[in-house]
Image (cartoon, coloured by chain):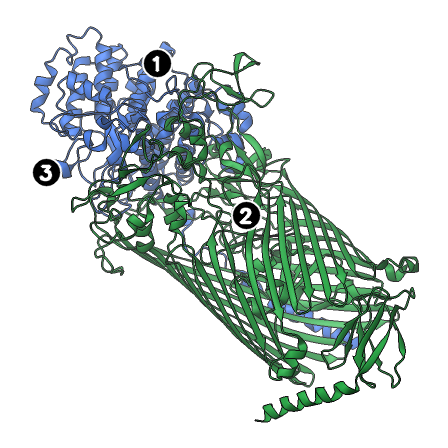
Chain colours: A green, B blue
Amino acid sequence: MKKIVLIVCVLFASTQTNAQHFHASGTVIEDYSKNPLPGATIQIKDRPTTAVTDQDGKFRMYANPGDVLIIRFIGFLSKEVIVPEAEEELIIYLKENATLLSEVEVVGALGISRSAKELGSSSKIVESEELNQGKVVNPIFGLSGKVAGLRINMYDSKVDPAAQVVLRGNRSLQRSSGIDGRNPNEPIYVVDGVPIPDISRLNPNDIESITVLKGANAAALYGSEGVNGALMITTKRGTKGKGQVRVSNTTTFSNVYLLPEAQTVYGQGNNGVYSPVTFESWGPAFDGSMQPFGTPLPDGTQPMVLFAAPERDNRLNLFQQGLNLQNDVSFSGGDDISTYFLSAQHVRQTGIIPDDKNERVNLRFNGSRNFGKLRTSYNINFINNRKDVTPDGPWISAYRFPANFDYDLIRNWQDPNSPGNPNNYFIPNGSWLRNPYFLIDNIRQTNQQQILNGKIEFSYQVTPWMEILYRAGMYASMDEIRNTTNKYEAPGTRNTPGSVNDQSLTYRRFNSDLIMSIKKDIGTVSNRLLIGHNLRTDYRKQHNVAATNLLYTDIFNQSSRVGELTGGSSLSEQRSLAVYAEYVAGYKDLLYLTFTGRNDWISTLSKENRSFFYPGISASFIASEAIPAIRQQRKISYTKLYASWNKTGNVTLSPYQLNNPYSQLNGFPFGNTVGFLPGLTNPNPGILPEFVTSYELGLQVGLFNHRLYLDAAYVYTDSDGQISNANVSRATGYNAMLVNSGRVTNNIIELTLSGDVVRNMEWTWNMGFNFTYTNNMVRELYGGADFRQNFRQSYAFVGHQFPTLWVSDYQRDPQGRVVVDAETGDPLVAEENVILGPMVPPYIFGLSTQVNYKGFTLAAQFESRLGGWFYSETVPPMYEFGTHPITAQYGREAFVWPNSVIEVSPGEYVENTELLTSGGGKEFWTRQGAVQSNTAAKADFFKLRELNLSYSLPPAVVDRMGFLSEASLGLVATNLFIIRHKDNNIGDPEYLYNNTDGYYSFRQLPPMRTYGMTFLASF
Amino acid sequence: MKNIHNIILSFVLLTGLVACDTFLDVNSNPNSPIAENLPLSAKLPGALVSTVNQESLQLNSMGAFWAGYWGTNNEGINQFFDLKTYNGLNIRSQREGIPVWENGFNNILFFKLIEEEALESGQFFYSGVSKIMQGWLFLRLVDVYNNIPFDEAAQGNNILNPKYEAGQEVYKKSLELISLGIEEVKMSGILPQTHGDILFEGDKELWAKFGNTVKLRALVRQSQQGDHAYIQNEILKISNEGSGFLDIGESATVNPGYLNTAGKLNPFWAAYYRDVQGNTLLNYQIIRPTTFLLEQYSRLQDPRISQLYLPVNGSYKGVLFGNMDGGNAQYDRDSTSAFLGPVENGGQATGLFHNWNQSSMMLSDFESLFLQAEASHRGWIQSDTETLYKNAIAQSFDYLKVPIEKLEEYYSQQTVSLASANEPLRNIILQKWLALNSINSFEAWSDFRRLGIPEIPGTVASGVTGRPQRLMYPETEIGTNNQQVQAQGSDDMTRGKIWWMP
């Protein structure tokens, strides 16, 4: 009742006051140059009414005498003016805030806020709104394309896709991850000052901002783990004032797209003859007839299929539309001495593969309270994620199948008379080629993951210039994984034995920091000293119990088995200690020098080598402040130059790598007979920490009254003496050795431009552009080797980028034409493999744009990556089984290999115009599919990653409603289009096989796009 | 100001105290033992099984395809593609290749580490056995790659780029190593109760015989190339040593005590016949004898055929090696003869598949007898060639569970018996080839490379010429020891040669 009265009063009051409105008008002028300022906003204090100055800096708006006008312009100090009694032309001077850019507070190392002007290295802040533009479920994907130097790859299209995060290029040749599961090229993730191994399950709506500290230098105080830069996540907390309740919902749908191109001319069979029992597309051309499919069923019927390729790609029938539902609620508030934040999120996803599901519940409690000089705060985050998927499978056979393959026919595989029943299925093979729906229903993996993550923090203001802070953080995750294969008895290879494997994986980290910070100005020099101590323990335990031969269908327990139980356990523990210090001296707010130093003690190294120290120095110079000539340039509003040098120690060892473990392999133990073999990586007790030296030079400029910002950085890093498992000649007896060897350098150029293209009363149009060029190069490998294998066709070559794609190719004449065998006419395969190029794109462009018109906002994020290659394992089977378009290009007959030559005498080539290949069927094309250059493609792409169209209710409307403080409605979409290199008919080059680079596995799902809507209200 | 100093000082002290050493001493592995924790008797079985697995699986299957025994039916046309098309580049590749080199040197390392530890602690049985086995492995690698490292091999990070030595040189050095090994075995003391010798149960004499037989095999191998004075001299050394060769019933087999559990069955059984649940494996479904092989058995009315293969409608049907045409129904799975196993034989042991716990074959007594027969035929050793030859066939019958009564009838054929043979050597090698089928097939491929007996047809895959003579140096080696690889010249699979080849 009270509320209604209030609303009525407000309405009444507003109509009342309207009558007395008169115009306030004036000009906003830039104080330094005395030029008018177009695009400044004028708002009546505590009211939603706003105006914007025009081209001449003029504005005109309704206001009441005595109202306070707040005049704001980015890059300038805001100013308050009281509307005078008489209607008069106001002249308002805005003073430039020369240090605005530097006023930005960044979350520095250890979660301590620092002013950006002090920083001697590059950083970028991504605010909540920008992060959540695409309404992603995993916050990492919200960063894609938004930060120069940061490359994020979504691995796959499963229901809970994983991400690869690389900041400023690959630096380490090592592939294996550490005890916390991060790969050696991944940055460190720090949530509210506590380093945690993974942020992919955080609720993106809980994130206030992510500060990306790019250099090893910025994160120097994190030591080892900060060597690849840091993602500093600040979660939301309550603020003083009226409590706020926010509710939001996002509903999006996902769909598969961009399937590898397939031929639609020929159907199943062998040598051009139809066969109902082969899945290979080496049969006759489709002719629209009805053909038998498989052998007759037990009831005597013969399933038939239409022998014609349908208009719509049949393979799409295997997929379904996925659904992502996110429901969020948060409560926040605070008073003078305490803050409160509570949020809950529920995410429910179904995948593009039928039956794939994921469900996540995310709870967060952040709070703080001050007790005089003592400030206390805590964060607790609980996450429960339950995933239920079919691990691999259904897709693996689909791209091998003929174009007319009828998925509906095999869907009801349980029916003993279905052609999809394992007893009848036309592929009698108990592998991945089983009926896709059988795989979906019978091979499952569930993973229940619980994460509890929190911190407590005490800080005590000892004196006005000294503070002591203690922060203890804990991260615990527990995974319960169950893999099951349902038993299905069928003859021969059609049989599917039942199995169950229960795994649990416990990981715990405790992290403690004790930090003393002192701030004291002496004359014109400001001093800040930080001394800290860090202690960390990591513990991981994994165990599994499995039975590989279950007795009964639908009964999954290890006791219902024949044969032996299998399983094992593995424990590992790692501890580290560190002391560190940082000293910042500032001279008159225009020159800053920062010195850092850290000493680490790490348990994974031997006693003699486990202590190591590393220093850093950086400087930042606010040129626009120091040199008046720059400021007098009207176009230049702000200039900062910075430089840094750092040496960072890094240990990528897992525990227990100093000794060679012996294990029982090849079936041992056989009863009482034991048999141990040493590991084949030669251990090295004398391994030392590796050191990364990095240099960075940068420039930040604000131009045209802060309408345009430019941030440019050049970075050089040199990672020498890398801890790596170097491949060695197997003739040494070992496969690899743990060594300090191998050197990789990175030359990186980063450019960020952002600015307002249009800024007036009704419209603002902001554009952002970022560019990264990463030239990383392998300088040296262990034992003087020229190259080493990284992963399958991915190699490290001295003098080339890492990793490099090295593949087999055809013999070619000097003009690059393929040499064919003078007798058989078949293209010859060169004895030496060829280098195609880097498997990570050296050039990355990000483009963002946002247009605001009244309450409407249209935001888009584009990204392009150029110059890389990728390799696909989906292609060779498509050659072998005749689904690849090229296998249909020559009518399945012998043909003259295009643009080919014959070597008539050594080094002399004549064009081949009539010599035909030995064939054009399966045998021929299978051999071509084994030529790996046919399997690679340029990885260039340009895609629209995110699109967001939203409408916020105008403040006036919201205001009138009283109980509501904000409401918006929007449409969101991701990956709406992609433009690929013309030679790429494989798929999305961004996709990866696990944590590889540029490698597309045979099990790789095609990409998916999402679109849907989102709604938000706050009270 | 003084105050600050005090605070800083106490802070540093505090942190220093926390940095106490024991906190960091958590780096000893709780999951696995290390070398020092294990006696040699716990290491030897691992190395022996690893070696015999390479012999009976990897080398045996490669040999079986290239010695004319195996082909694939229509269902298997996509399998063993590289072997059937002599694709040296793929075979050398790290991803889908056949890591003979890698496994070979790993196995050498296993024995080398045992040898080093044994010499330090004076346990000469283990050092001797390790030397003999290293000799075996080096010889194998020469037979596949010709020039390989010997002196500088398996030295860990002491020698990162082991220098290759000529194949012939490695042969000589391997024989010396085996001789040394035999000496050490003979001079060793009493073995502990748990000795871990799952090859000869600690029988030193058998080890000596085994060593001598391996040496004889290496000498016979050089028949077409070797220095005859050297051969004679080595034969003399063997006879001076006095233990002789592996005799009837003295096959070198490894049995760690196979169990009827997944991963613990006899590996050949588990790879080519049935899994622990009794389901037939893919290999069993697709691997078929070649028509050429079946013709040889039929021509000689060889009773062994019925112990080896499953007849289809009363007759034995083979396939063409390298046939890529899946459309010919004659070579369908059900139209061709699979291996015969106990399940298809009323539960009775068959030729290749006796039982899931059968021993793995390292070197059979019949091979030893055939080797001696050839050496005797060549006049290198003084013995009765015919007796050795006949015993060898008898032992093959015995191994394949063919009733011994059938031997006389078989042997009485002119095509079999040695006495009436125009070319006795041809008979010896043909019979050896028939006996080694799918057991030590690699040896048969080596005999074919040496003598061209029997006239095994090449692959029928189109566009493929030549015969496999060797493997190319592996990609791992090109990546890590390329200078050495390049120095060896062409390693083309169909044109390159092993030093002992004519």
State the image coordinates of residue A686 (x, y, percent, origin top left): 56, 47
Residue B231 — which label?
1
Instruction: Please tell me whether residue A58 is drawn above or below residue A632 in the rendered image.
Output: below
Front: mark 1 or 3:
3
Q: Residue at x 87, y 86 (%)?
A: A85
Quadrant in which residue A780 is drawn: top right
Subunit bearing disc 3: B
Q: What element does badge 1 sit on?
A: helix
A995 and A922: which is toward the camera: A922
Q: Is residue B161 left or right of residue B114?
A: right
Which label belongs to residue B205? none
Q: Quadrant of the N terminus of chain B?
A: bottom right
Amino acid type at mark 2? Glu
Q: Residues within 10 Å of mark 3 (few under 14, many from 20)?
A: few
Which subunit holds the residue at mark 2? Answer: A
**Label 1 chain ID:** B
Separation (CA) of disc 3 from disc 2? 57 Å
